[in-house]
Image (cartoon, rainbow, N blue to C red):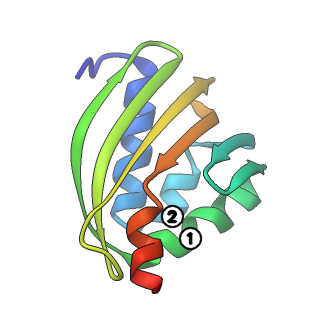
Protein backbone atom coordinates (compact mmCIF):
# COMPACT_ATOMS: atom_id res chain seq x y z
CA UNK A 1 0.00 0.00 0.00
CA UNK A 2 1.15 3.52 -0.75
CA UNK A 3 -0.37 5.08 2.36
CA UNK A 4 1.08 8.56 1.87
CA UNK A 5 -1.16 9.38 -1.09
CA UNK A 6 -4.07 11.73 -0.50
CA UNK A 7 -6.71 9.65 -2.30
CA UNK A 8 -5.65 6.46 -0.56
CA UNK A 9 -5.74 8.11 2.87
CA UNK A 10 -9.29 9.33 2.24
CA UNK A 11 -10.39 5.98 0.78
CA UNK A 12 -8.97 4.05 3.75
CA UNK A 13 -10.52 6.44 6.28
CA UNK A 14 -13.88 6.10 4.52
CA UNK A 15 -13.51 2.30 4.38
CA UNK A 16 -12.60 2.10 8.08
CA UNK A 17 -15.62 4.25 8.99
CA UNK A 18 -18.27 2.30 7.09
CA UNK A 19 -16.83 -1.09 8.01
CA UNK A 20 -16.97 0.06 11.66
CA UNK A 21 -20.66 0.82 11.04
CA UNK A 22 -20.13 4.57 11.51
CA UNK A 23 -22.07 5.72 8.48
CA UNK A 24 -22.11 9.34 9.66
CA UNK A 25 -18.31 9.44 9.74
CA UNK A 26 -18.12 7.57 6.43
CA UNK A 27 -20.39 10.13 4.78
CA UNK A 28 -18.09 12.95 5.92
CA UNK A 29 -15.66 11.69 3.24
CA UNK A 30 -18.33 11.73 0.51
CA UNK A 31 -18.94 14.77 -1.72
CA UNK A 32 -22.50 16.09 -1.86
CA UNK A 33 -22.54 15.48 -5.62
CA UNK A 34 -20.93 12.02 -5.61
CA UNK A 35 -21.57 9.77 -8.57
CA UNK A 36 -21.32 6.03 -7.98
CA UNK A 37 -21.52 3.33 -10.61
CA UNK A 38 -22.53 0.08 -8.91
CA UNK A 39 -23.82 -3.27 -10.17
CA UNK A 40 -27.42 -2.08 -9.74
CA UNK A 41 -26.80 1.13 -11.72
CA UNK A 42 -25.79 4.73 -11.25
CA UNK A 43 -26.30 6.46 -7.91
CA UNK A 44 -26.12 10.25 -7.78
CA UNK A 45 -25.83 12.49 -4.73
CA UNK A 46 -24.85 11.91 -1.11
CA UNK A 47 -28.38 11.17 0.08
CA UNK A 48 -28.88 8.43 -2.51
CA UNK A 49 -25.40 7.07 -1.79
CA UNK A 50 -26.14 6.85 1.93
CA UNK A 51 -29.39 5.02 1.15
CA UNK A 52 -27.39 2.61 -1.02
CA UNK A 53 -24.79 1.91 1.70
CA UNK A 54 -27.01 1.76 4.80
CA UNK A 55 -28.61 -1.68 4.24
CA UNK A 56 -25.23 -3.29 3.59
CA UNK A 57 -23.64 -1.68 6.63
CA UNK A 58 -26.48 -3.12 8.75
CA UNK A 59 -25.76 -6.71 7.68
CA UNK A 60 -21.95 -6.39 7.80
CA UNK A 61 -20.25 -8.64 10.36
CA UNK A 62 -16.56 -8.47 9.42
CA UNK A 63 -14.19 -7.31 6.71
CA UNK A 64 -10.68 -8.29 5.64
CA UNK A 65 -8.55 -6.05 3.45
CA UNK A 66 -7.12 -7.69 0.35
CA UNK A 67 -5.23 -4.72 -1.12
CA UNK A 68 -5.25 -0.94 -1.34
CA UNK A 69 -3.36 1.32 -3.73
CA UNK A 70 -3.59 4.96 -4.68
CA UNK A 71 -2.11 8.22 -5.77
CA UNK A 72 -3.12 11.84 -5.28
CA UNK A 73 -6.50 11.55 -7.04
CA UNK A 74 -7.43 7.87 -7.35
CA UNK A 75 -7.49 4.92 -4.96
CA UNK A 76 -8.50 1.29 -5.25
CA UNK A 77 -9.54 -0.69 -2.17
CA UNK A 78 -10.33 -4.40 -2.46
CA UNK A 79 -11.71 -6.40 0.45
CA UNK A 80 -13.77 -9.41 1.46
CA UNK A 81 -16.76 -9.07 3.76
CA UNK A 82 -18.64 -11.45 6.00
CA UNK A 83 -22.33 -10.57 6.21
CA UNK A 84 -25.40 -11.97 7.91
CA UNK A 85 -26.60 -13.82 4.78
CA UNK A 86 -23.22 -14.84 3.27
CA UNK A 87 -19.81 -15.78 4.70
CA UNK A 88 -17.80 -14.27 1.84
CA UNK A 89 -18.77 -11.30 -0.30
CA UNK A 90 -15.77 -9.76 -2.05
CA UNK A 91 -15.89 -6.15 -3.17
CA UNK A 92 -13.78 -3.33 -4.53
CA UNK A 93 -14.09 0.41 -4.82
CA UNK A 94 -12.11 2.60 -7.17
CA UNK A 95 -12.61 6.20 -6.06
CA UNK A 96 -11.71 9.65 -7.30
CA UNK A 97 -10.90 12.21 -4.62
CA UNK A 98 -11.03 15.98 -5.04
CA UNK A 99 -10.65 18.49 -2.18
CA UNK A 100 -10.46 15.58 0.31
CA UNK A 101 -13.89 14.21 -0.67
CA UNK A 102 -14.82 11.13 -2.70
CA UNK A 103 -16.49 12.51 -5.81
CA UNK A 104 -16.76 9.32 -7.85
CA UNK A 105 -16.89 5.64 -6.93
CA UNK A 106 -16.83 2.62 -9.20
CA UNK A 107 -18.21 0.05 -6.77
CA UNK A 108 -17.91 -3.63 -7.66
CA UNK A 109 -19.06 -6.62 -5.66
CA UNK A 110 -19.95 -10.21 -6.31
CA UNK A 111 -23.74 -10.48 -6.30
CA UNK A 112 -23.74 -14.26 -6.77
CA UNK A 113 -23.40 -15.18 -3.07
CA UNK A 114 -26.37 -12.94 -2.19
CA UNK A 115 -28.50 -14.36 -4.99
CA UNK A 116 -27.68 -17.89 -3.84
CA UNK A 117 -28.57 -17.01 -0.22
CA UNK A 118 -31.96 -15.63 -1.35
CA UNK A 119 -32.88 -18.97 -2.98
Residue situated in front as seen by the camera: 90 or 14? 90
Q: On residue 76, which mark appears?
A: none
**In the rendering, at what x and y percent does residue 89 appear?**
33, 61
The residue at the point 57 percent across, 26 percent down is: 97
Q: Please, what secondary structure does the residue beneath circle 1 have? A: helix
Residue where numbered disc 1 is placed: 54
Mark 2 or 1: the one toward you: 1
The residue at the point 38 percent across, 29 percent down is: 9
How much space separates mark 2 and mark 1, taking CA atoms?
7 Å
**In the rendering, at what x and y percent does residue 68 appear?**
30, 30
Residues packed near mark 1 inside 10 Å, few (<14), some (14 to 19) or many (20 plus): few
Report which quarter residue 75 is drawn in: top left
Residue where numbered disc 2 is placed: 23
In this picture, residue 87 sits left or right of residue 117? left
* First of labels 2, 1 by sequence position: 2
Q: Is residue 104 above or below residue 14?
A: above
**In the rendering, at what x and y percent does residue 7 appear?**
46, 24
Quarter of the image with the C terminus in it: bottom left
Amino acid sequence: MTENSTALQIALAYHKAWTSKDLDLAMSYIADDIVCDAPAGRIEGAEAYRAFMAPFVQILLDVSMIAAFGDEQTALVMYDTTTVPVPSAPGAECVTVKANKITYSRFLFDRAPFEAARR
